[in-house]
Each structure stands twice: as structure tokens, then as C-alpha cells.
Amino acid sequence: MDLKPALKKLQQSPSFRKWQDKNKNTYFSYAFKIPQEMQENEWQLGFYDSKSDKITTFVMKEDSIDIRKEDDVFKEDEAKVHQLEMDKIKLDLEEALAKAVEFQSKNYPKDRSVKTIAILQNIAGSGNIWNITFITESFNMLNMKIDASTGRMISYNLSSILSLRKE
């Protein structure tokens, strides 16, 4: 299931409507997927509460919707969490991944991906982006930010997984 039908299915569900009635200050802020670990029709959809500065995630599966308890947002303290503008998103996940694979193959052919992390989010200064990270066979991370409207590569960075290690 593509993202837009998954979001529509969530928004039409009685459990979500009941939750939303109690959480008026929330808005859709991210979609998350690890294709190698999640079912084809599975998505994690996050809704940000501007008053509590917390996020609630709904796990969409083929035949169920699970709600996770409200949690802290993974962001810099002063960073603002922006609402996704779904009407401006033209690239679906498959198209974004194809652009990421093409970029990786051309620019980093020795860094073949073994795991993919894809997040659709709205980042200040960049707008709606697919934030795609490849974990590679050579223990690197290739992070690519792709404009979700135009498909243009906004930025990329290759770094070692070992650089994440704390001293």
C-alpha cells in the first residue's frame, strides 16, 4: 500500500477519529518505513502535538492499526516540527528509492545498501523531503535528502557507522 492510501485508511478509521477528537493540537508530521524489515503494506505514521512537543505513532498494517504511546520527538531542542503538505508530494516511496539507488550506483558503487531507512518529513528550508539512508556493506551510511515534489537531490552525505560510536 502506498503512503497516501495508508494515510487515508488511518484517517477514516474509528480508532484514529476517536484519538484525534482528544488530540486537537496534532498534525501529520512524518511517515517511516524500513522496507527490508516491514511488510509491504506497513507504515509508521507520526502525528505531532505542538502543545506537549510529543509525537504519537500509528503503525499501519494490512489488517490492523496499532497506536504507540506518546513519545519524545527526535530533534534538536529548538527545532520546529513541521506539518507534511501531502498535496505537494508528487514522489511516492518507490520513485524516491529509485532515485536514491540511481544516485548511489553512480556516485558510490562500492557502497551497496543492505538496509534502507526512509522517512518522509517537512524540514525547514527544504520543505517536504524523502530522507533516505542506506546502511551499506562497508559499514557506511549514505544519507540522501530528495525533494518530494520535484525528485531533485537536495543533499547527501556519506559517513562511517563507526563515527556514531560514543567514546
Image: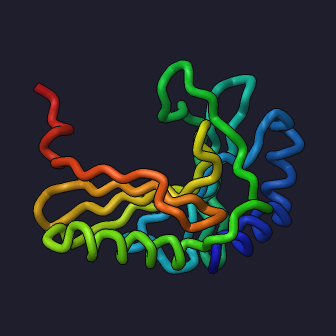
Is any atom of residue 94 visible in this view? yes
Q: Quadrant of residue 6?
A: bottom right
Vertical comparison of 134 with 75: above or below: below
The residue drawn where x is 64% and y is 77% is 2
Is any atom of residue 32 visible in this view? no
- Direction from residue 155 to residue 124 in the image, left or right: right
Closer to us: 165 or 127: 127
Q: Residue furthest right?
A: 21
The residue drawn where x is 70% and y is 50% is 84
Q: Position of residue 80 (x, y in %)?
A: 62, 29
The residue drawn where x is 81% and y is 37% is 23
Closer to us: 16 or 160: 160
- Direction from residue 6 to residue 76 in the image, left or right: left
- Direction from residue 110 to residue 115 in the image, left or right: right
Closer to us: 132 or 37: 132
Closer to us: 46 or 109: 109
Q: Quadrant of residue 148?
A: bottom right
Q: Position of residue 42 (x, y in %)?
A: 55, 71
Q: Position of residue 87 (x, y in %)?
A: 79, 62
Vertical comparison of 72 with 11: above or below: above
Quadrant of the rendering where the N terminus is positioned: bottom right
Question: What's the coloring here?
Answer: rainbow
Q: How many marks?
A: 0
The residue drawn where x is 11% and y is 62% is 138
Quadrant of the rendering where the C terminus is positioned: top left
Q: Position of residue 69 (x, y in %)?
A: 60, 41
